[in-house]
Amino acid sequence: MTETQVTPRTILKSTYSTDIRILVESFLVDRKTQNLQPKTVDFYREKFGAFLTFCESRMLKNVDDITPDDLRYFLLWLADTGHNPGGIMAYFRTVR
């Protein structure tokens, strides 16, 4: 039997959240620290806001719960709510 080595990386991985909301907020903070324009950060916030609304409607809380079909349904949901193909691609690029 081999002993599992504990490293800072394994500790970080074990405590890393997969909660979608936390990860989105972390992404937005990262973009702010990269000195992106406030309008760019707002763009990301808007796109992720719609994605979070969609995830909540499907009771998806963790990134690990999201399947490729969920992403396809998100794109269909955007089309059903009046977004044009270019707008849908903007959401897709953000969530990807």
Image (cartoon, helix red, strand yellow):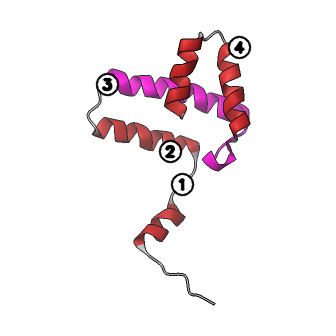
Question: From the viewer's perspective, is 60 left or right of 16?
Answer: right
- Residue under numbered circle 2: 23
Residue at image coords 73%, 35%: 69
Q: Quadrant of the C terminus?
A: top right
Circle 3/circle 1 CB separation < 8 Å: no
Q: Magenta part of the protein: which range?
A: 38-66
Q: Which x, y percent locates residue 9?
A: 43, 68
Label 1: how many Cα within 10 Å (few below 14, some 14–19, many 20+): few
Disc 2 residue type?
Leu
Task: Confirm whether the magenta stretch covers residue 59.
Answer: yes
Q: CA distance from mark 2 to mark 4?
A: 27 Å
Question: From the viewer's perspective, is 36 left or right of 59?
Answer: left
- Which SS class for mark 3? helix
Question: From the viewer's perspective, is 42 left or right of 1?
Answer: left
- Residue under numbered circle 4: 80
Circle 2/circle 4 CB separation < 8 Å: no
Mark 3 or mark 1: whose residue is earlier in sequence? 1
Mark 2 or mark 4: whose residue is earlier in sequence? 2
**Which of the 4 image quarters holds residue 49?**
top right
Task: State the mark number for residue 38.
Answer: 3
Q: CA distance from mark 2 to mark 3?
A: 19 Å
